[in-house]
Image (cartoon, rainbow, N blue to C red):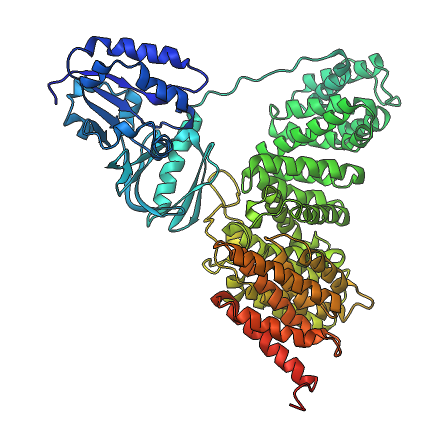
Amino acid sequence: MKANPTASVLFPYSFKTGQINGDLLIYHVLLTLKPYYAKPYEIVVDLTHAGPSNRFKTDFLSKWFVVFPGFAYENVSAVFIYNCNSWVREYTKYHERLLTGLKGSKRLIFIDSPGKLAEHIEHDQQKLPAATLALEEDLKVFHNALKLAHKDTKVSIKVGSTAVQVTSAERTRVLGQTVFLNDIYYASEIEEICLVDENQFTLTIANQGTPLTFMHQECEAIVRSIIHIRTRWELSQPDSIPQHTKIRPKDVPGTLLNIALLNLGSSDPSLRSAAYNLLCALTCTFNLKIEGQLLETSGLCIPANNTLFIVSISKTLAANEPHLTLEFLEECISGFSKSSIELKHLCLEYMTPWLSNLVRFCKHNDDAKRQRVTAILDKLITMTINEKQMYPSIQAKIWGSLGQITDLLDVVLDSFIKTSATGGLGSIKAEVMADTAVALASGNVKLVSSKVIGRMCKIIDKTCLSPTPTLEQHLMWDDIAILARYMLMLSFNNSLDVAAHLPYLFHVVTLLVATGPLSLRASTHGLVINIIHSLCTCSQLHFSEETKQVLRLSLTEFSLPKFYLLFGISKVKSAAVIAFRSSYRDRSFSPGSYERETFALTSLETVTEALLEIMEACMRDIPTCKWLDQWTELAQKFAFQYNPSLQPRALVVFGCISKRVSHGQIKQIIRILSKGLESCLKGPDNYNSQVLIEATVIALTKLQPLLNKDSPMHKALFWVAMAVLQLDEVNLYSAGTALLEQNLHTLDSLRVFNDK
């Protein structure tokens, strides 16, 4: 085969959909191959890093087969496919009908290394691009790795100088041939790498929805190598060119005011004097009300430590000239990143008095003004995320102050949640926002906690409008998970105000327990621990020694392996460590493994009863406490509302915590059971129906002892239990038996069998 000339190397990855005219590309390829048509020739197709952006649309792909002359096909000795990857495999599957003629062709040869290509084509004839060949240089190879997905696959991980290669260890069928797949991820595409534990890590790639999860004995070495190439790529990037916004006439006072105040803190005495005189000229020219505190003078000696003077001037102007607020704050934020650390601290000091003025623009009739307030909040959020050295000061000065402004909180939380959502669950943005919510709450615990918990309850309520089989599949799942992280951050030191919100907190916990990725499950567990801790330590509630003992025992109990299993985190050593897993860039939510541990409704039963014990112990020391009534009302609402992901949980909780039940409620639960049976008999995919049936049976088991003695439902429930057992479903046997046993005990206590 080496005797034949190589016509050309085609690089599909250089074709970008929408950027290159497809017809011109075909014309170019035809011209390139034209000199070779008359005699045998070979083609090399380099598929290195081919992906969705290089996709040929179906009509364009079919055109290739139509326009090529027949004799051009006849003289092709071989087509070498180099570096086939997972995306190419899926693409060929999708277009299987069009590519039928190529399946199993002996002229189609898959190649996975330059060495193997050299067996067919001389080195000087290969013509592979330098970027492709560079991937084989300076490689660190880690064999026997496992890529975790719906089907786990053995792979080798190769870390080079510019990219990570994940090569399958087992052959996969592509176009009728068995080939090795080689997925390539350049350093520029790696968004995050996270060490889950000593044997597992995740890789987040740009434009890929789910992080890639790998297992290997040398995870730390792999992670270090990938961090190294990512960091080297970042350092090689040129600094971005700063964009200066144009100053409008109305921006002049605010812009000059920031320049004057900032430079009053300069270490240069001459600059301080010039800044003071600029401030004097500014107040005079624009008639700013400064109450005679300033007088322009030459030769004035201004000490370097004049922060209190600068802040007092800023406070006076913020109170007297609030119309300058938007322009002034925009200029402060714009210049912040370019200032020294000392001047950044000064800037935060004199910015703070102006923040309370933002409220007047939120209530303004002018939409443009309201949008500018939102834009300023977004810029402050970006500043919080980017300014790592100033992070604690920004939290205290900016967000601590904004948290005290009641009328601004809704707008601020909207911006927080929007930023978290754009970053995505577990992103640095989402985690910083959750962290910042703590600073926001420091100024007004009651209001911030009620807003966050209220939003969580509203979003969970909305899932009933468009129900999905599992909560993770719902469009609002990211918002729910993000708010769950907010609640975890706020739960320490009673920033969730447990005295006011305990029923709502327990309601959310029972709906989210053992849901989502590993770190979120650990977060839900951490939330419960922190809630109990807050009950023990908060000053608003005064408990007896007996109640405190119950709370302390509960803290110990929830940290036992038994409860780790119930929360779906049985494989972790420390829930707190997993909840705050760190990544190479910043504190980050670890996506971990998305494989869910099996969650049984009996586990929810145990968790609910443990939470109920805590609530009842506390209520004994609080006269006229309505916590349990509120929790029962919340559970009942979800129990009687169709929602496959949450209704079964709510039914179990309702059964566990109810202290009274009506004949009508039992009938309603039996109707739900009836609907579950109908769905169960309709098709093979009846898992959710079985879960619903099990939930109704558990609820009926718990509620029957509460029924009125004269209720006709007692005898009816015997036949319900028998019917469930006759379904012959292994998953329902335990629940059906428990209902039958409870029913017989209840009937016996009512002396039904005495005369039999």
Q: Residue at x 65, y 62 (%)?
A: 651
Nearer to me, 164 or 172? 172
**Quadrant position of the N terminus in the picture:** top left
Q: Report x, y in % for residue 5.
A: 16, 16
Image x and y of residue 409, in percent: 75, 39
Q: Position of residue 470 (x, y in %)?
A: 56, 50
**Is residue 686 shown above or below 745?**
above
Q: Does residue 581 appear left or right of residue 509 in this picture?
A: left
Q: Is there any visible trace of residue 295 in the rendered image?
A: yes
Can residue 267 be seen by looking at this rendering? no
Q: Which residue lies furthest to the left in this view?
A: 3
In this rendering, would 526 be left or right of 507? Answer: left
Residue 30 lies, in percent from the top left, at: 29, 11
Q: Number of numbered discs present?
A: 0
Horizontal side of residue 414 vs 357, given as left or right: left
Q: Nearer the viewer, residue 184 or 331?
A: 184
Name the residue: 40% across, 21% down.
Answer: 59
Quarter of the rendering containing residue 689: bottom right
Q: In this view, does 577 lie above or below 262?
A: below
**Which image quadrant: the C terminus?**
bottom right
Q: Give the camera-side residue of 654 and 613.
A: 654
Q: Is 331 above or below relative to 709? A: above
Which residue lies at the image location 55% right of the left edge and 65% below the top edge?
Answer: 603
Query: Which quadrant of the figure has residue 712?
Result: bottom right
From this view, report whether residue 8 is shown above or below residue 52. above
Q: Residue furthest bottom?
A: 755
Which quarter of the picture shows residue 244? top right
